[in-house]
Image: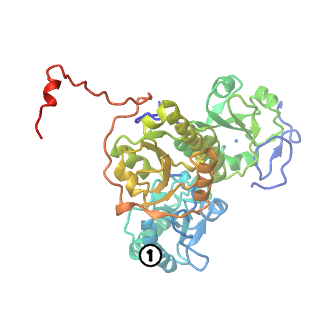
Amino acid sequence: MRGGHGGARGAGGAGHAGRGGGGGGGRESGAAMGVRGVGRLWWGTVSCTLFLAVNSLYSASDDVIELTPANFNKEVIQSESLWLVEFYAPWCGHCQRLTPEWKKAATALKGVVKVGAVDADKHQSLGGQYGVRGFPTIKIFGANKNKAEDYQGGRTSDAIVEAALSALRSLVKERLSGRSGGYSSGRQSRESGGGDKKDVIELTDDSFDKNVINSDDVWMVEFYAPWCGHCKNLEPEWAAAATEVKEQTKGKVKLAAVDATVNQMLAGRYGIRGFPTIKIFQKGEDPVDYDGGRTRSDIISRALDLFSDNAPPPELLEIISEDVLKSTCDAHQLCIISVLPHILDTGASGRNSYLDVMLKMAEKYKKKMWGWLWTEAGAQSDLESSLGIGGFGYPAMAAVNARKMKFALLKGSFSEQGINEFLRELSVGRGSTAPVGGGAFPKIHSVEPWDGKDGELPVEDDIDLSDVDLDDLGKDEL
């Protein structure tokens, strides 16, 4: 069904020993060591220059440290320092207003507290890892780097500095009491019981097929040995990633672990020769090795890519009410709105062909996490006018940034090729834009959803002329 709410839905390192997947950073060979029997919040990112050329809010000349998935673990998680980290998006007005205060606070705290910033629009996996849902989000990484605290204070440099010093005093007190030792690096081992492993699913020879092979979900499975040092280093990263991946994918991507020294049948079946080895299982496909990095950020990023690859396309909704328009456009950085010809002009088959084109494009660009909407010509005439469509030239398409209230119009053909070129240009920040008429969405009329059928002309009532004396009509005097 396409109408109404239902819509159509849509670096690790070198030097590892042994064979099999499992990421960089080195592996200990089970064969050599005597194995016992033996993968643009909205958020695909859209360029921040989509409608206005907005660069990163911070530069190397600032005292704010730019953080990315490549350096976050080393700079923050493995650091002994207290960190204040802002997760921002360059297009976010609140973030832009915070920038000078954040820079001022960073300068004041230099050498005392580390102040960093993450472009979470560019590095969505890192934002997702820490549950970032809006911008700016500020988190404090103190004694336990695995449990960052949300900053809820004011947005002035004075308030930020005061909060940082308060957190620093708490950290010092914890160290004096001996309660904070051993947490800052985030490297607890299985043997020490560190790390919350509640979301890592332990699998065995008996439970593997039922849980993994017969599942519609994606599984990332670590094969480990209890004595393996690299496995011990991976364990807290794997556990932290499991929790975030479970939340971000609603359980559609699962992280699991197999003790290959005990479950030797599984180890033999999948040719495990070194530890840790990580394999990715998807229904109907042969398992593949995970060869990415071993930080939680790397693992989460790969898991979210797998989720996106296997996720259904976005919903394609008909604009039947104001709520449909606003909820879709407010929840996505872009919403793609098509105005299709009247049903009397195309019939059901013609309309379905246009909707099929939109569905294919929604599938192709689903990693962008855009919203997809359509309406019939004339049903929302005020909306058409505000987007410069103006009652002619159907079908038409506009890409709208509801935060900036700017839009771009499709100027090519309403075809897979034409729309693909249009959306590709938007993805790299090119294309002419204009402000939405009136600076806001106009009133949206509530209409009945399309029933999927051909349109019918209104039936005209027959006029009864039986009582009219047609002969008298010619006798009227002028």
* Residue at the farthest top position: 466
Tell me if mark 1 has few (under 14), some (14-19) or many (20+) residues whose alpha carbon lies within 10 angstroms of its own.
some
From where the camera sits, is residue 243 visible?
Answer: yes
Vertical side of 316 occupied by 286: above or below: above
- Residue 272, given in percent of the width and then of the height, sits at 81, 36
Q: Residue at x 76, y 38 (%)?
A: 288
Q: Is residue 50 shown left or right of residue 274? A: left
Q: Nearer the viewer, residue 349 or 89?
A: 349
- Residue 450, given in percent of the width and then of the height, sits at 40, 33
Q: Which amino acid is tagged 1? A: Glu
Q: Nearer the viewer, residue 201 or 254?
A: 254
Residue located beneath label 1 in the image: 101
From where the camera sits, is residue 123 visible?
Answer: no
Quadrant location of the C terminus? top left
Q: Nearer the viewer, residue 209 or 457?
A: 457
Q: Is residue 262 shown left or right of residue 218? A: right
Vertical side of 346 occupied by 389: above or below: below
Q: Is residue 424 shown left or right of residue 405? A: right
Q: Nearer the viewer, residue 449 or 155?
A: 449
- Residue 71, given in percent of the width and then of the height, sits at 65, 63
Vertical side of 144 occupied by 59: above or below: below
Q: Is residue 270 shown left or right of residue 184? A: right
Q: How many marks can you see? A: 1
Q: Residue at x 82, y 29 (%)?
A: 268
- Residue 455, given in percent of the width and then of the height, sits at 41, 30
In this picture the colour scheme is: rainbow
Label 1's element? helix
* Residue at the farthest right position: 32
